[in-house]
Image (cartoon, coloured by chain):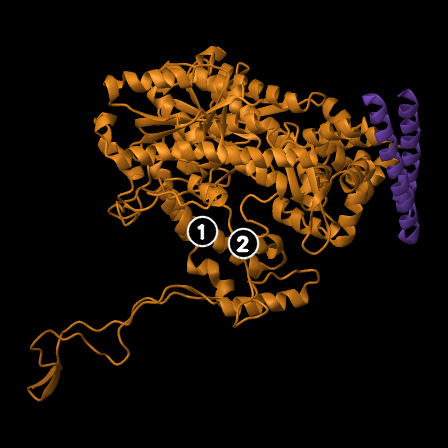
Amino acid sequence: MNNYKNTILECDKTLDMLRKEWFKAEGKDKEKWSLCIDSFLNERLRLMKLRNGECQT
Amino acid sequence: MSMNRISFDTETHKICLENIAPQLVCLTWATNQEDNAGLVAVADENGDGVNSVIDGLLDPKIDDFQRIGHNAAYDLAVLLNHRPDQVTNIFNLLESGHIHCTRIREKLLNLAQHGHLDLDPLAKQPIKYSLAALVWGYFGVKLEGKEGEDAWRMNYDKLTEVPSAEWPAAALSYAKDDSVWTLRVWEEQEKRKNDFLEQTGIDPFECLTFRCMVDFAFFLVTSWGMATDAEEKEKVEDMLAEALAPEKMAILFEHNILTPAKAPRPAANGAKIHVEGCKKTWKEDGKIIKCNCPVKMTKGVKEKKSTNNLRAFVSQFAKVHENVALSYTSPSDKFPEGQISVSAEWLDQYAHLDPVLGALQNREKVQKIVTTEIPRMCLKDECGDVILDGNDRGVISPIVRFPYDSIKETGRSSSRAGKLYPSANGQNIDPRVKRCYRARPGRVLVSVDLSGMELGTLAQKCLQLFGFSVLADKINAGVDAHAYLGSQIAYHLCDEFRVICDKNSTSDKEAVYELFVQMKDSSLWEDKYHEIYAKYRKFAKPTGLGFPGGLGAQTFIQFAAASYGVTVNLKTARRLKEIWIETYPEMAHYFKWITTDCVDPRNTHKEGGELYAYKSPFGLYRAGALYCAACNGVGLQSFSADGALLGMYRVVRASFDPTTESCLYGFDNYGPVARVVNFIHDENLVEVADCDELHEMACEIGNIMTGAMRVVTPDVISEYETVVMRKWDKVTKATFENDRLIVTEN
């Protein structure tokens, strides 16, 4: 379970960085960062499900 | 294996002004054991018959029986009036899930299956919840005797003193039929529930017990009602008449949306109403003399709204303003594309953009109060007409009640005026009318409001989902969440504030907030900085409460203007959303989670898009929600409704049930020392004895409410604000004397 927890924390750090970039960016760059954030959020959700699955077993 | 079942129903005197849970005449029941339906009248065995049946029905030791009622809240209130000693048993049975209501069950099934409570999405028909409607729906059988003056339902008072053995057969069968059919409806609902559970693994009745408790508590609140103040009502009417005076409507006359009223005037041709035998004109000393008969008057014309001119104006308005969406009436043969419709909701969205629409919106609101709200608060004669006083004004009822619908799609409650007794929509009383309501003699009104309730539940939801929430951290640290967001908005959007931050080398979010909050103190900072604080904190409210509901920038502009009077352009709206997400990063995860994990697998939008489904903390499953409704429901409305409604229920129980050992229970010369009189989403309005223990009672209400919120938000602090007043009004500041709450005189 801890493995997933740590990976999620890492993911959050990256997301923080990405969000800062997104906040500064304008126009097309903004879209690029949005896509990046989106895929990291997907990843976070996937990790959460794995973590929860592990919890249940 | 499921429990044995007994359905029950009561017949009573007619609902009247004094009592909406009137005197009991008979109690009927039906059980799932074959052919076992019975009736006992109050007149049987000098009342012992009905009492022993009530003792059995409400005995908590008999716990292998499920008690079932249709609109059980009403029957329980009737039984409570007949047998006040049963109060603890009723609350205990409700809480242990031994009393259920088929009306609530039907709503929960609809909510779980398609998410619509009022309109059937397939049949495009209104959904009704009366027993007759459910029997028709499940069995295709029309219940006899439900309509018409001679229906027994309306005439049981005539049998009050007649033992049931001497009742006419029709009166007996009508009364028993309701219990029999309630039980049959329950069985059908059970099949529907089991099918749904089998297909989806979701139990639509997970929150049934809680919802039945809340429904009963609401009925008790409605039964008590709120006292009114006839003098204030007259003042309000004068004020409203002034607001509708022709000089205030000039802008609407100018645009021909309104045509001014015309008083009756003498006929232009000088016509008169001649008395019989009048010679009309005659000559006297060579002069023509005219008679003195009264002059004929033209008919007066009332102020009139021109719908066509209004439509033309609105159509022009939509051409000038980008992004204004017109709303249309349903297509008809004459207008296959429908006509422009200007509803109150439409005006709420766009009236801020144009002074003419603003004036119209104000007029419509005041008109509604004058023509609908005030007459509904007045006494009526047998024909249903308002009783007038010597000045042709309606006589206000001494008690006005707020009927509630305890469950809406969002899981919240609603209120609406009805026709059975003087009533009003207690959750949407115009601020101008509030003062018409007051505490009864010897009583004061205690208003207890859960502060920042929806922000708290949103924070809790994010904590549960993602394991972190900046919003929760801020609330728990005692930070003013609106000011915190306001400080971040000011940092990015207000040059003057940014300059000060830069001068102080302040860029860290917490330091920016500290500096921002200092500006609140006008003794330390010049007025202009104090204004910056006020302005950007106000900006934070629609930002912090609008965007979590999934609003886009465009809709946000309308929401901010309509709800908070904050006007922003599209660019600023977009920027506000960015700043908000930057401030509370968990919100990006929240939206992502809604779009990936809340998609409704069984319902899709009629135009092909996704619909969403979610569960509230107590297990209310709502399907078929639009994206914004889901965003709003998951973290804000449905989540907070569970906690707030539990708080309301507990306060009601504390004031009724001595076993709670609460200071809210007791009686003095004026009656019970505390009664909840209204509930408005995050506010409980309680009528409390004006006595030395007022402070303790107000704290007790606050503690019960925050205690209930803690059940749903265990990791986020919830707090309350309380004010004591005599007349209901928007009093914002509580008054204390020696650290004890006292009445804020208003």
- B470 vs B743, left or right, is right
Residue B343 position within the rendered picture, expressed as x and y whole percent measured from the top left = 54, 57
Relative horizontal placement of residue B469, taking residue B291 as reference (left or right): right
In the image, is B197 to the left or to the right of B366? right
Q: At 45% across and 45% down in the image, what residue appears? A: B136
Report whether B511 appears left or right of B153.
Answer: right
> Do the residues indicated by labels 2 and 1 lie within the same chain of the protein?
yes
Q: Secondary structure at mark 1?
A: helix
Chain letter of disc 2 in the image: B
In which quadrant will I find the C terminus of chain B? top left
Cα distance between the residues tagged 2 and 1: 10 Å
The residue sitting at the front extreme is B34
Which amino acid, by three-letter code, is at mark 1?
Lys
Residue B300: % across, % down: 32, 67
Q: Can you say which quadrant of the picture contains the N terminus of chain B?
A: top right
What residue lies at 47% left-to-right and 60% top-to-bottom? B249
**B364 w.r.t. B505: above or below:** below
Q: Is residue B31 above or below residue B605?
A: above
